[in-house]
Amino acid sequence: MKRSGFIASTTVGFTRALSHALMSEEIARQRGLLQALDARVRVIGLFALVVAVTLSRRLAVVLALFVGAAILAVLSKVSLGTLAKRVWLVVLAFTGVIALPAMFVTPGDPIATFAGGLHITTQGLMTAALLIARVETAVTFTTVLILCTPWAHVLKALHSFRLPREVTTMLAMTHRYVFLLVETASQMFESRHSRTVGRLPRAEQRRMVARSAGVLLSKSIDLGNDVYLAMQARGFRGEVRILSDFSMKPRDYAGLLAFLCAGTLAIWMGR
Amino acid sequence: MALLFELEDVNFEYERIPALRGLSLQIADGESIAVLGANGSGKSTMLRLLDALCFPTQGSVTFGGRPLTAELFHQDGFALSFRRRVALVFQNPDVQLFNPTVFDEVAFGPLQLQWQKHEIVSRVSATLELMKISHLRERSPYRLSGGEKKRVALASVIVLEPEVLLLDEPTSGLDPRSQSQIIDLIQDWKGSSKTVITATNQLEIVEDIASRIVVLEEGRVAANGKPEEILSNQQLLLNANLVHAHRHSHGTYEHSHPHMHSHSKHEH
């Protein structure tokens, strides 16, 4: 990161995070395949597919599920470009770091040898590829679920599965808290940016980040408390209530059956 | 008029910093009151106590003769009935807007109070019309201007048709047109014999919205009376930091006089 662009790029990052969150809400309101299904079916169905991804030991099966996740995303109006930028590249970077040593340390048939007696083995390569494919596919399914389902509906679906009220309340508050944190941080950095001339020395940058983090934490705690009070003031008692009632229609049963069949088939084929 | 709220020797602290110190006040049903005070005088804390969002560290707050306590609000029946009757509009609209769309935001309160779904849809639509924000119904509250946010925050409370409306700085930071629209709305509300308690430090609006003024100073009631009595007492307003001594010159002659922050009422 360039020294001169630190504040500006942080501000841009916060703004981007906010616009991503807003974009998610817009996708959730569109008419797509997942959006047409009951929220509970979406939660159970995609959870079943994530379980299938985790239990599959064959790369081909996991890759097939990955293709399925991409098709599901397109049919649900989620652009592949968005997924590539927000999920696939990020997951590849993080999981790649974890998977890289597996290529060298897994015993097996060497396919490439490096100085110092290091080998990349076929088994190591397959292990690394399986790990990356699993994480990519599971995160894609989860992201598609979150993008296509308003947060309140996810919470209500979880609540209908008898998840304790405390957990759903905590999740509801966390969602708003993260939003407030990003908004507050964005405003702080904008204000700092408007008062910064020229390049900041590295030491000053570090001091500024430490100071900002402290102020941000205490500000966001206050704001978070106020949001909770504002929810209480309008009668919130810890239970998520939404306007649309969940009701299972024939297409929801069909969707649930399709998800469960796909998951079971993947687990069976991926043994 | 019957007594609605009674605050008796109320003390409240935020982490050992006192916000209210022995505040005593009575509010009758149907009254419209402006609570004046400089920043930090305890106005917002008083409104939060009246809305039972916090409870006194000493003293008591009663509503309809019943002391408001944390234990009482553990009962769903009482809590929901109180929230139906008493509503608060926060000073910072951002804390009050946490739903994905304006429609969902206004529907949040009625949903919590477990109204019928068809009633919620019709009441929310009517409230959006009343507040002239129907065109914003599908917009995200985060994307609105300051004035629009205030209106949505107000709509989210007015939809409940509460008997008591608590307003914390409802016109601060608004442009003149938005201010006058909010004042019109408060006047309509006041005219419908409901109780309206408005915390503000904008002296120029109090005569329009209140028939009684309570001045707070360092967490206590410094004065309590009719608007004409309070607003004509320049020394009281100076002491409460609601006006300041303003020095200026007329040609070569320089003088000072108490000065309100509204230039529409700034007369010589």
Image: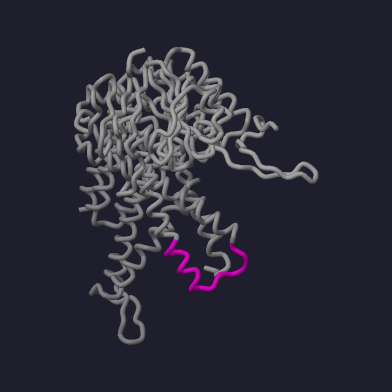
- Which is nearer the eye, B98 or A194? A194
Magenta stretch contains residue A4? no
- Which is nearer the eye, A234 or B43? B43
Measured as percent of width and height from the top left, residue B223 is found at: 44, 30
Residue B262 lies left or right of residue B228; in this view the side is right
At 37% from the left and 40% from the top, the residue drawn is A226
Residue A258 lies left or right of residue B186; in this view the side is left
At 32% from the left and 68% from the top, the residue drawn is A125
Q: Residue furthest bottom?
A: A116
Measured as percent of width and height from the top left, residue B78 is found at: 23, 23
Q: Residue furthest right?
A: B251
Find the magenta span and give its range.
A196-211
Compared with A37, A220 (above or below) is below
- Can residue A249 be seen? no
Displayed quadrant of residue B120 = top left
Compared with A62, A2 (above or below) is below
Compared with B257, A100 (above or below) is below
